[in-house]
């Protein structure tokens, strides 16, 4: 009986994904509103060198990302915070916290983070999670709370950890974002081995401080193993890129 119920739930969620309850325009609006909320609550880093560096890496990733969610232009903001975190939101928004730069220590490692987060957006993982929340909370009436930046929706978009709401992406979404992110950084000319080093650094950092990224992502050892399996393919892509970026 339980297996039958589980099967029905899986079919229902697949149907919801195939027949979206909300469209890209609505989700993009939610992402923009969530980003404005974060900007109003979090100090923005003004150092021109830090901003130039982060935007150099982010724009290189975005230059090779195939995004058909309706975003015309991306906004990249560096936040001054001790959170070891970064995120990308529907609607073309990227946030990077300065503490992340102590763990993602070079352009390749930062590209690994941003490639992964952008991967979530272009694969519409935020939309899928919002739809799951809509089903769980009773349907379309949840849209009313979305407009008020409901913490649950912030979590579904991928920025809920700082508001005490942690809604991890599913294992399949994480794996998909890993693969997309690894290919994005390779196409952009960033060395994919930086992704392995990044998660080794994350593992080391967790002995001193639990990075926000680890609250919503699989354990570093799991991630490292999965990335190592995909590394040969990514390196082949990387080696074909003639002009490698120099973001410093």
Image: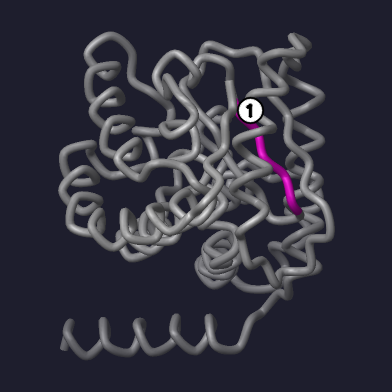
Q: Is residue 93 magenta?
A: yes
Q: Residue at the location (68% across, 45% down)?
A: 150
Label 1, on which residue? 54
Instruction: Decide which of 209, 141 is in the foreground and name it.
Output: 209
Q: Where is residue 109 in the image (x, y as percent from the top left)?
A: 41, 32
- Left or right: residue 218 versus residue 188 is left
Circle 1 packing at 10 Å, graded few (<14), some (14-19), many (20+), is many
Query: Would you say residue 41 sits in the magenta stretch?
Result: no
Q: In this view, does 223 lie above or below 176?
A: above
Q: Which of 166 and 62 is in front in this view?
A: 62
Residue 21 position, x and y percent, is 66, 79
Rendered view: 26 above or below 79: below
Q: Quadrant of residue 68?
A: bottom right
Q: Give the range drawn in magenta.
A: 92-96
Q: In this view, does 92 lie to the left or right of 206?
A: right
Nearer-the-camera pick, 138 or 78: 78
Q: In which quarter of the image is the C terminus?
A: top right
Furthest-front residue in this view? 242
Residue closest to the eye, 161 or 74: 74
Q: Which residue is drawn at 49% across and 89% down?
A: 15
Quadrant including the N terminus: bottom left
Which secondary structure lies at badge 1?
helix
Tell me what residue is drawn at x 39 percent, y 60 percent: 237
| Residue at point 42%, 24% (across, down) | 104
């Amino acid at each position: 009986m339980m297996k039958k119920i589980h099967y029905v739930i899986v079919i229902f969620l697949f149907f919801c994904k195939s027949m979206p309850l909300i469209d890209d325009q609505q989700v993009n609006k939610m992402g923009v509103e969530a980003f404005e909320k974060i900007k109003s609550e979090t100090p923005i880093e003004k150092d021109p060198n830090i901003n130039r560096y982060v935007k150099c890496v982010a724009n290189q990733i975005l230059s090779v990302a195939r995004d058909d969610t309706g975003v015309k232009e991306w906004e990249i903001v560096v936040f001054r915070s001790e959170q070891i975190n970064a995120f990308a939101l529907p609607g073309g928004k990227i946030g990077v916290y300065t503490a992340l730069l102590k763990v993602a220590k070079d352009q390749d490692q930062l590209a690994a983070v941003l490639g992964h987060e952008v991967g979530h957006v272009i694969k519409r993982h935020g939309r899928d999670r919002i739809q799951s929340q809509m089903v769980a909370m009773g349907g379309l009436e949840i849209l009313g709370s979305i407009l008020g930046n409901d913490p649950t929706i912030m979590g579904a978009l991928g920025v809920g950890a700082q508001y005490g709401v942690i809604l991890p992406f599913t294992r399949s979404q994480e794996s998909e974002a890993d693969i997309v992110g690894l290919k994005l950084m390779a196409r952009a000319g960033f060395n994919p081995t930086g992704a392995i080093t990044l998660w080794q650094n994350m593992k080391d950092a967790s002995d001193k401080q639990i990075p926000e990224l680890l609250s919503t992502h699989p354990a570093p050892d799991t991630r490292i193993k999965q990335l190592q399996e995909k590394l040969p393919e990514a390196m082949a892509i990387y080696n074909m890129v003639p002009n490698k970026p120099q973001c410093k």
